Image (tube, rainbow, N blue to C red):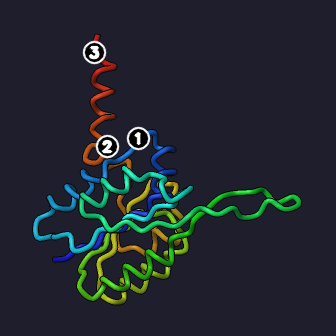
Amino acid sequence: MQLALAVDGHSMFHVQQKLGWFFDPRRLLELVAARPGLEIGSAFWYASLKDPADQRPFRDALTSLGYTVRTKPLREVGGEGDQRLYVRANLDVEIAIDLLTVAPRTDELWLLSGSRDLERLLEVLRVRGLKTVLIHADGMVPRELRNAADRFLDLAALRPQLEKAEALQQAAVSRTP
């Protein structure tokens, strides 16, 4: 069985900050590879950038791990009058195009995102016969997105399998007398 993996880097960065730990992209691939009968057919990582050189070493590492990295520059939205200024780079269209493109050769999708805008995409992929798994933090994902997936996995429950090794080493060192 072929699996497509899609990580909304911006969404996951913010949810991991709130959880207080970060997952290792390599360990995510290992988690998928450990599932019997499941092979990674496609792995995508979507990232927003302040400038073209932003996160270059991290993006290069993702590429060497086997991820296809899609990027988009951040842009300022709002800020006039009483509106507050915020910065965003919406990669939902890129996620949808990539997943619809690989859908004919994919059996299962793991989506790591909290974007409500991807609800319809999950519905369409389910109709096409893909098993859809949404991975995010319980209580932080929109109900509509969660309901559109076949299965929901709480990122917090996956902490032992996914947490960055550096964080685990630092915790062990800080406990040593």
Which residue occupies 49% across, 71% down? 145
- Residue 134 seen in render: no
User: Quadrant location of the C terminus?
Assistant: top left
Q: Amino acid at mark 1?
A: Trp
Q: Which residue is mark 2?
A: 163
Image mark count:
3
Determine which of the numbered discs, if any, sits on residue 21 in the image: 1
Are the two marked residues, 1 and 2, in contact with CB atoms closer than 8 angstroms? yes
Give the quarter of the figure containing the N terminus. bottom left
How far apart are the two marked residues, 3 and 1, measured between alpha carbons? 20 Å
For label 2, count other residues whose C-alpha is less than 10 Å away and answer few (under 14), some (14-19) or many (20+): some
Looking at this view, is 26 or 110 the one in front? 26
User: Which residue type does callout 3 highlight?
Assistant: Thr
> Residue placed farthest to the front in the image?
53
Residue 65, position in %: x, y? Answer: 24, 58
Q: Quadrant of residue 33?
A: bottom left
Residue 133 position in % (x across, y down): 34, 69
SS type, badge 2: loop
Q: Report how far apart the C-alphas of labels 1 and 2 lie in the structure.
A: 7 Å
